[in-house]
Amino acid sequence: MNPTLITFIGYLAVMITIGIITYRMTHTLSDYVLGGRKLNSWVTAFSASASDFSGWLLIGLPGAAYAAGLGTWSLWIAVGLAIGAMINWQYVAKRLRIYTEYSNDSITLPQFFENRYRDTSHLLRVISALFILAFFLFYTASGLVAGAKLFQGTFDVDYHFALTIGAIIIVAYTFLGGFLAVSYTDMIQGALMSAALLFTAIYGLVQIGGFGELFNQLGSINTSLIDGFADTAYNEGEGILWESAGAIGIVGIISALAWGLGYFGQPHILARFMAIRSHKEVRKARWISVSLGLVIPLYGALIVGMLGIITFDQPLGDPEQVFIQLVQVIYNPWVAGFLLAAVLAAIMSTVDSQLLVSSSALSEDFYRRYFRKQAKDKELVWVGRISVLVIAIIALMIAWNESSSVLDLVSYAWAGFGATFGPAILFSLFWRKTSRNGVVAGILVGGITIFLWPLTGSALYEMVPGFLLSSIAIVVFSLVGQGVSDEIKAEYDKVAGVK
């Protein structure tokens, strides 16, 4: 039997086993959605990183580096993400963990907004849940596309067959174990992703003689590949292979760096901050996540993509296959199978988180709020599980187009969450005068801007105008409205005073 296939089967068996074990540990909706706020710093750190990166880390980002070297998006995206993640851990994680517990033990982002601003109309909660569902459909679809490309590139199977099999696998253990299954598998998957990129980058560099030789060979192909300010064109189908395409320009650099703003509004990452067992463990989790779970895999992915340029004699038709093809060339089948399982790990670790947050929005923010206010926890857990199935089917339909790009889908969803919820979270946590009307306006303006900005034809990443306009809306509507009650101010002061 194929060694790679055996490795895959063994890995999947472990993931399903974890799902079955955690199924027996899941009794309440809090268990299913946040794991009962019991995660330690190691699980929280790797789970946050793994749910963040998804298949784009081992498929999308290496593909961008393969197509353009250090130019275009790849280098500046990595810089922006590293800065954004560090700030998110440094300032948002602890405050959000404390505030969600003080605000009537909120277990979802929409519930936190409603409790934070005493919104008895439930408008804030409904709007938040709707945007979460809308953008997660695209994000989940990106993970399913990445899974299909993995199976297609590894086993040479039909795209649609691969897409369906990947969806079934991911849904299975998310359906069973909920947040605990997702978090514990994410810890394994996050470590596996970091190891795969680190060892592949080091092995490849050693084989060619180090960084100097890598840049020498890239420069001999085209100097734009080693210039962070130069654009490079790659389209194998039209015979365009690593041709200079001028300077990136300030708009391109700002757009790439702006990816870092997205961290403040990602529900599946913020959920990890809410689930850590104590805000006092955030500092330890931060260093674990940033060093082992962020910097190493981000820059490892860039190196892997550039190694692919000088490794393959025949240019790849799909740059996003570079990691998959590279590990099969430089490793024996058993090691390759282990490293390719890391790609599956990356994909599963984010899609499961996205499915879970989406299902919590349906079960907690719609079903219990509007259909069954007296629903028991067991019933809500099953509503959440059924929601996972429904959302996965819709995402599968979006991903059915074989020409779908992992990075394009991630880029859109990342901007959607960053602009819609990023300013709302930051102002809610750090500005005492923020009002309910301000947050409603900010969420609406940010989300609508993301939907409409592509119609302008501008090259500027929609995250930038979306985040900026959302922030302005929050400030303006908070200052001109009715203001904030003494009760809300008192809670804010109490949370701000927690050490």
Image (spheres, rainbow, N blue to C red):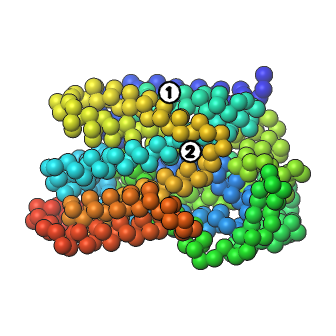
Q: Residues within 10 Å of mark 1 (few under 14, many from 20)?
A: some
Residue drawn at x 27%, y 72% is 475
The mark that comes first in sequence, 1 or 2, is 2
| Secondary structure under the numbered disc 2 in the rendered image | helix
Residue drawn at x 50%, y 37% is 395
Does residue 449 appear left or right of residue 486 in this picture?
A: right
Pick whichever, 146 or 430, lies toward us.
146
> In the rendered image, which quarter contains the N terminus?
top right
Residue drawn at x 75%, y 70% is 245
Q: Position of residue 400 (x, y in %)?
A: 59, 36
The residue tagged 2 is 142
The residue tagged 1 is 172
Residue type at numbered disc 2: Ser
Q: Position of residue 206 (x, y in %)?
A: 82, 58
For residue 252, which numbered disc appears in the image?
none
Q: Residues within 10 Å of mark 2 (few under 14, many from 20)?
A: many
Does residue 345 appear left or right of residue 451 in this picture?
A: right
Residue type at numbered disc 1: Ala
Residue drawn at x 41%, y 62% is 449
